[in-house]
Amino acid sequence: MNKLEPAITLASLHKDVRHDSGPKHVTGTAEYIDDMVEPAGTMHAYLGLSTNAHAEIINIDFSATKAAPGVIGVLTGDDIPGENDVSPSHKHDEPIFASGKVQFWGQPLFAVIAETRDQARRAAHLVKVTYKDLPVSLDVRAAQAAGGALVTEPLKLERGDVAAGMAAAPRRVKGSMAIGGQDHFYLEGQISMAVPGEDEDVTVFASTQHPSEVQLMVAQVLGIRHHAVTVNVRRMGGGFGGKETQSNLFAAVAALAAKKWNRACKLRPDRDDDMTATGKRHDFVVDYDVGYDDTGKIVAVDAVYGARAGFSSDLSGPVTDRALFHAENAYWYPAVRVRSEPLYTNTVSNTAFRGFGGPQGMLAAERWIEDIAYDLGKDPLEIRKANFYGTDTNNVTPYHQTVADNIVHRVVDELETSSDYQARRAAIVKYNAGSPILKKGIALTPVKFGISFTATWYNQAGALVHVYKDGSIHLSHGGTEMGQGLYVKVAQVLADAFGVGLDVIKIMGTSTGKVPNTSATAASSGSDLNGMAAWDAARQIKERLVVHAAQLYQCSEAAVQWVAGGIQAGDKFVPFAELAASAYLNRVQLSAAGFYQVPQIHWDRATGRGHPFYYFAYGAAVSEVTIDTLSGEYTVDRVDILHDVGRSLNPAIDIGQIEGGFIQGMGWLTTEELVWDDKGQLRTKAPSTYKIPLASDVPPVFNVKLAEWSVNKEPTIGRSKAVGEPPLMLAMSVVEALSMAVASVADYTIAPRLDTPVTPERVLMACERLKGGRQ
Amino acid sequence: MTAVSGAIRFILNGEEISLTDIRPETTLLDWLRLEQRLRGSKEGCAEGDCGACTVLVGRLMDDEIIYDSVTACIRFMGSLHGTHVVTIEHLRGENGNLHPVQQAMVDHHGSQCGFCTPGFVISLYGLWMRNPDPSQGAIEKALQGNLCRCTGYAPIIRAGKAMSSYGLPQGDPLLAERIALKDKIKAIHDGRRVELGEDAERIIVPASLDDFAALYEANPEATIVNGSTDVGLWVTKFMRPIGPVIFINHLQELKAIADNASEVRFYAGVSYSEALPVLAENFPDMAELWNRIAGEQIRNMGTLGGNIANGSPIGDTPPPFIVLGARLTLRRGSHRREIKLEDYFVAYGKQDRQPGEFVESVTLPLLPTGEKFAVYKISKRREEDISALCGAFRVFVNDGGTVGMARIAFGGMAATPKRAKAVEAALVGRPWTQETIDAAVAAFAEDYQPISDMRASADYRLLSAQNLLKRFFLETTGHGQRLRREVA
């Protein structure tokens, strides 16, 4: 090896490295939990779900179930040695098995354990439950009308004098916007397999974004300590927030059965049951009152964010908090008061979903921008720009954090130019004037998304790195892999730190036994946190190796340099493997636990003040659509995106997150409609009725670019920025483009006020309203 | 007397399989995963909609093995007799490396979580075999039955566009193997009926169409399974027993398409995919509808006969076929009768089909010169979605400019596919003008009182049905504008 070769030639950081599991994915050899070899005698559990949205349970008759072929037993709340609760908010409001009453259609009542999954599933459907109906409250408006009971404490953010602002505002707009929820539709559904061990021990293989919480819940349910529970996650077949807390129950039931019968137990619901029994993105109704001036500048905002939380608190507190944190998107509100209402409803308890309330908060902001633009007869982009946060002034958020890294102007200006927005908009206006049935629309919307868990203590991470004496490296950290490429990014960080190739590093599945007390892989934080923790572990080992090398090769520590493939000790090049071997023989510790805590952040929820976000990620998108004013059907014809990921750790992976996030966001806002019937039963609970985007929904022109000039102002890993969630919100541009197309039927004089998802039906009905002169 | 064999025989990847003990309800996916421990094919939905379980099934057709992508989750084992099942585990390139399709997917970052990926690879492989250098449109069509929640499809489409540069089918190591397999598959088709099990466990694979007719007449309680795109869900979603069951998807006689100068006859086993070229040639307007029905795998499995016979109010075949005057041939034993298709649908869940009687063929008269015809599907998602409504229109405007004949039928608007006779009456004898159309739309409310459900509201259904008549008028008078997605 040429000793003069600089380290950078081996470094994989900031490069288009492929997903570490790619070859396994394409050959079907990547193992998901249902693919694992089951221990001999593995039992299968199946959940029995309620068929009433709110009722007292009068009686449950298990006689037919217990007599069914293959049935080993039945589990109910009475079989739980610890607590019958998996509430992640620790409000003890989420039983594993409902007892006494059911609070939503699809709530687990019991589990049947049988020799095969098919037997358990069939037997579970033989149970007869007698209910006594209680009154139901199914959605935001019904819950508000019924008195507005909340599942957790609401939040208020306030800055400036809203009353004075409203009074002084030359113009006012009031309105409401209904924003639909979204099912995660991870392709791999919820699943857990538990294997009993000696004493109280149990090992759980769970498809979860939050192994440490699964560990806690299993311990809580079994009434044992955390150290007896090991949770392992090699990979998930998609998560998107749907496996942050929703996997708890499945893991707990599998563990309960495994310990009770001392046999391994696996639990995997059918897709319909998964969609019925697990939480989704919160749907919101936002009621707003906005004061603005004749130039379209916002003066004051007063808004209430009612959210369908479902029957329990789950994560509805932080989700509705984050809706408020993004109630201004990228806009400066001189005076603002925003309040959340996490409303109790007799529906499944809604939960985390990519963006975590932020998308709903931003979408409402874009709505009043549109209201203002149509009122003033201006291009909404002009109003957006007029209200952007400043860089030095007008840069304090409703939660009193100063936006110190604002790059929205440059992002938007560059995209406006690169997408040829102005010329295309003019052409569209002309096209619409001469096109009686088909109408086009175009819109540019920005995104500014706050990065950090608003639960400040979550902003920590650990990693465990072993260097073996052959120079191979074993990497564990607290983050989980759900497809987002976290594992390969952290491996890149580690390879870069040691100056070795990626092939030297073995990426281990995530285990609570390797790294304790981990945070959920959520809030886009995975590579920020775990990359830094891994880097810290490498730093410790490298420091020891430098001391060792200086002694061994009799040079100063300063003379030991990390170079490609090893070290340069004075004038001697030592390959990494040789260095590791000699370090072992000289009794140097080759293992380290790395740790990272995000600096600067703090948040006082009681006062609504603080610095909850370490930094912001920015982006913008232009979407162009065509609608059919006879049917409301439409196509998304072209999308241009410019997105900020700081200095990308892996541009290929980041582009993948942006493309995927955008399409997922587009699905949320267009075709993905959740429909409950008046009894509270979800009617869109399978892909036959719940329509996520297809390959043929991808815009035929789809230009996605990174803002390559962006460098995180904060010292994050490689000066990168988080990428998981922010791109989802770029899809707001589709809604606003549809809005423009609809607005064309009334010559752009009326804001269409489309609720989401903007289904063909909503487009057609909005066209009809506008033709009749109504919003 | 028909000779009888007691084994379902097929080729799994490279291995000959003979099954003598299998239940009617056992699906290919469960068998692969649980019995064979081949776990590359995944269960994402168990209803044929997500494609994570996609495998190829090769079947003998005109002395060639034709490979169809199908969803293993709703394909029953009994339907595999005499086929070659190819799963992701069998896909390899030269020297055991990744197959060109697999390598293209890896290099283009086509997988993220990876759960859907084996299904996508198989779908792309099926496409690559017949069209290695496809257009974006062809890729999208081949992937209509595969859901991905991570990538947004863009990298998968890029992989599809690039896959020919990684290798062409001529060099595919599986090609030679498949040629050798043909003789084995032909040998399985030995003219014998296959029968397994008794009573509710009974599986019958008839030797011929006549054998099937006789068997069904004698066993009218049996479930007929052709493409299993509907019956599959009875099992996977509703856990219904389906035995005794007669599988008929292999019957070549039911795959026939016969046409002459005045009509075209589709036998009941013709799949959507097989019907498309013939429909598109004779009724160009039908092509758009046909490409929007289901995903590729379901179009490969589902049949015209099944779509009609099951009597669904939201099937997409009946509306256009009704307005075209389709006739149904129903057969019981050796007795055949012919009825108008529209008379087959008696009420919700009730059809004019006697015990032991089956739909043998549907005959579609060609459109007389000068008549105008169109069919429109409206769904929440453009592709692979069940229609909120599907409307078909046919008029004859005579030389004087008045409507001589009008036929309109809709799915999704009533408990059965149904003619809009009041609307038709409001058109016939009147001039084919905007005024007539404006007056006629009110009659929709007489014909249809649609329901609100998860696909659409009653108001939307009625309004958009009315608008479809307006569209039809505009299109027939040169003022139409049709939403079309333009891809390279």
Image (spheres, coloured by chain):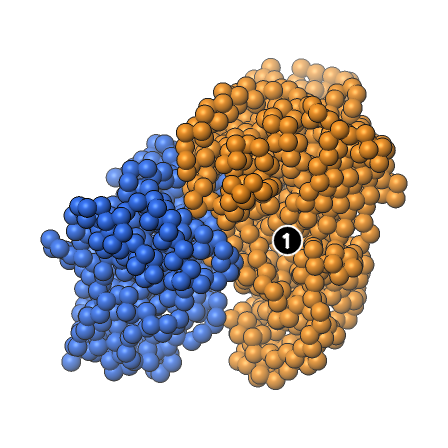
Residue A104: percent from left, percent from top: 67, 65
Establish if A340 lies above or below A415. below
Which residue corresponds to the image point at 48% horizontal and 70% vertical from the top-left? Answer: B238
Residue A421 shown left or right of residue B79 in the figure? right
- Chain in orange (letter): A
Q: Is residue B205 above or below residue B39?
A: below
Number of marks drawn? 1
- The residue at the point 35 percent across, 68 percent down is B310
Residue at point 69% right, 23% down?
A295
**What residue would you read off at disc 1?**
A280
Quadrant placement of the N terminus of chain A: top right
Q: Is residue A55 at least partly visible in the picture? A: yes
- Residue A706 appears in view: no
Left/right placement of residue B323 relative to residue A81 reads left
Within 10 angstroms of label 1, few (less than 14), some, or many (20 or more) residues?
many
Question: Which residue is pictured at 21% across the width and 77% down the height?
Answer: B332
Instruction: Identify the hue of chain B.
Output: blue
Nearest to the observer: residue A428 or residue B449: B449
Q: Horizontal and vertical percent for residue B407?
A: 27, 57
